[in-house]
Amino acid sequence: MRKIIVDFKKMNENIKKLFRTQYPDGYDNSDIIEFRNHRNELIKAVEVDGEEEKYLIKLSTTQSISVDKL
């Protein structure tokens, strides 16, 4: 399974649909994973599982996602 990092603002309609399905009421802190990229920057993301890919939806530090807005 491939892992693909996608910025929240750049999600396509397919990924948005998967996101709404997996997080119908939004996400909380327990859903957020943290890792460091190759520049040693801390990245926060939410996992969304597709059929053949696992998407890591990259969040900004000030971002609060409302599923209704997707």
Image: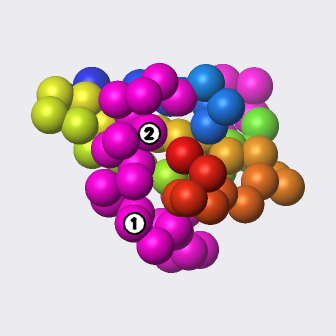
Give percent across and percent down for residue 50: 23, 37
Instruction: Please determine whether, in this image, residue 57 is positioned above or below residue 12.
Output: below
Per the image, the residue denoted by label 1 is 24
Give percent across and percent down for residue 51. Answer: 14, 34
Q: Residues within 10 Å of mark 1 (few under 14, many from 20)?
A: few
Relative to 13, 66 lies left or right = right
Residue 18 locus on image (x, y percent): 32, 44
Say what amino acid the circle numbered 1 marks.
Answer: Pro
Asked if 67 appears above or below 18 in the picture, the reply is below
Q: Position of residue 52 (x, y in %)?
A: 16, 28
Residues under numbered marks 2 and 1 in contact, where contact means CB atoms less than 8 Å apart: no
Q: Which residue does the numbered mark 2 point to in the structure image?
A: 16
Please tell me which residue is depicted at 30% across the width and 55% down the height of the picture.
21
For the N terminus, give its image quadrant.
top left
Q: Is mark 1 on a helix, strand or loop?
A: loop
Q: Which of 39 and 19 is in front in this view?
A: 19
Look at the numbered disc 2 and give the secondary structure of its residue. Answer: helix
Q: Which colour scheme is used?
A: rainbow
Mark 2, other Cα within 10 Å: few <14 / some 14–19 / many ≥20: some
Which residue appears farthest toward the left when viewing the image?
Answer: 51
The residue stretch that appears in magenta: 11-40
Residue sitting at 46 percent across and 73 percent down?
Answer: 25
Vertical order, 5 against 47 (above or below)? above
Q: Quadrant of residue 29?
A: bottom right
Q: In this view, does 11 lie to the left or right of 21?
A: right
Q: Nearer the N terminus, badge 2 or badge 1?
A: 2
Q: Which residue lies furthest to the front in this view?
A: 68
Q: In which quarter of the image is residue 2?
A: top left
